[in-house]
């Protein structure tokens, strides 16, 4: 006997003992307009199976919709979203062809393709397909894209491309100059009366170098080169 389908006035009302889908939360599945939730265990089991099969997060754009919210967003009058058996999933971190194959393998039957909006609709059926499939991609996405902080020496800025490169190299030059002066103090004794002033000049230059280095890293990040 299958688990019963239950409706909750708010996703926070779902008991922890009923929620067994480890990669999802009631808030993700709930109606975006009303926070209501229709808990459909069979559909959620397939969603979790799809997540396990793909091995990477599923970004859910829309899951359950209350009838009033479905009307408000222009959904189909008999949309499967109102039954809690449909999910719109963003393709930004998935290869659409691989995603479709995996979704069919775990038992989803209805497929809607929305390449302009960047998502695929899947539901429990009946079996049908609509929309234009995503164009083929030259390379599929990796199983996971690791989050790795870039080493400054490998940064675009340190390769001298643009003003950011000059700024970063200048900051490094200040540090080198300080070391050279420290070793050569014996040769510049006539400048001893001015060393205190020079020290503050170098401190100011060092701070300026740090500032431009930070700016350069922000410049890298903005250009998506991290």
Image: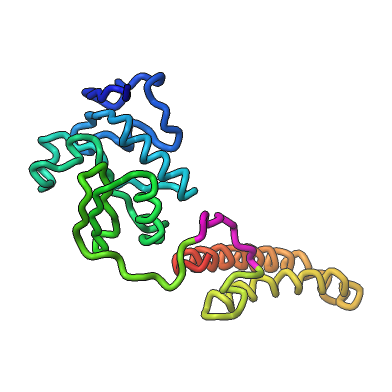
The residue lying at 11 percent from left, 46 percent from top is: 76
Quadrant occupied by the N terminus? top left
Range of residues picked out in magenta: 142-152
Along the line of sight, the residue nearer the viewer: 196 or 61: 61
x then y, percent, for residue 61: 29, 47
The residue lying at 70 percent from left, 67 percent from top is: 202
Left of 28 or right of it: where is 179? right
- Colouring rule applied to residues: rainbow
Left of 29 or right of it: where is 203? right
Residue most toward the right? 186
In the image, residue 189 sits, relative to residue 32, either above or below, namely below
x then y, percent, for residue 70: 13, 41
x then y, percent, for residue 47: 36, 41
Along the line of sight, the residue nearer the viewer: 45 or 37: 45
Residue 146, magenta (yes or no)? yes
The residue lying at 21 percent from left, 23 percent from top is: 9
Left of 212 or right of it: where is 23? left
Residue 209, magenta (yes or no)? no
x then y, percent, for residue 8: 24, 23
């Amino acid at each position: 006997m299958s688990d019963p389908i239950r409706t909750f006035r708010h996703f926070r009302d779902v008991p922890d003992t009923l929620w067994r889908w480890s990669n999802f939360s009631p808030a993700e599945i709930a109606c975006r307009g009303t926070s209501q939730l229709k808990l459909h265990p069979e559909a959620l089991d397939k969603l979790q199976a799809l997540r396990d099969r793909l091995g990477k997060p599923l970004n859910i754009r829309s899951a359950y919709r209350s009838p009033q919210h479905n009307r408000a967003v222009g959904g189909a009058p008999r949309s499967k979203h109102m039954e809690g058996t449909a999910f719109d999933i963003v393709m930004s971190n998935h290869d659409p062809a691989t995603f479709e194959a995996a979704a069919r393998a775990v038992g989803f039957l209805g497929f809607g393709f929305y390449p302009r909006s960047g998502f695929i609709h899947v539901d429990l059926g009946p079996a049908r397909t609509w929309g234009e499939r995503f164009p083929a991609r030259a390379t599929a996405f990796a199983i996971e894209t690791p989050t790795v902080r870039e080493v400054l020496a490998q940064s675009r800025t340190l390769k001298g491309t643009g003003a950011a490169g000059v700024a970063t190299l200048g900051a490094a030059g200040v540090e080198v100059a300080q070391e050279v002066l420290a070793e050569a103090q014996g040769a510049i004794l006539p400048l001893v009366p001015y060393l205190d002033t020079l020290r503050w000049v170098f401190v100011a230059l060092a701070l300026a170098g740090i500032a431009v280095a930070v700016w350069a890293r922000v410049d890298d990040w903005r250009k998506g080169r991290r």
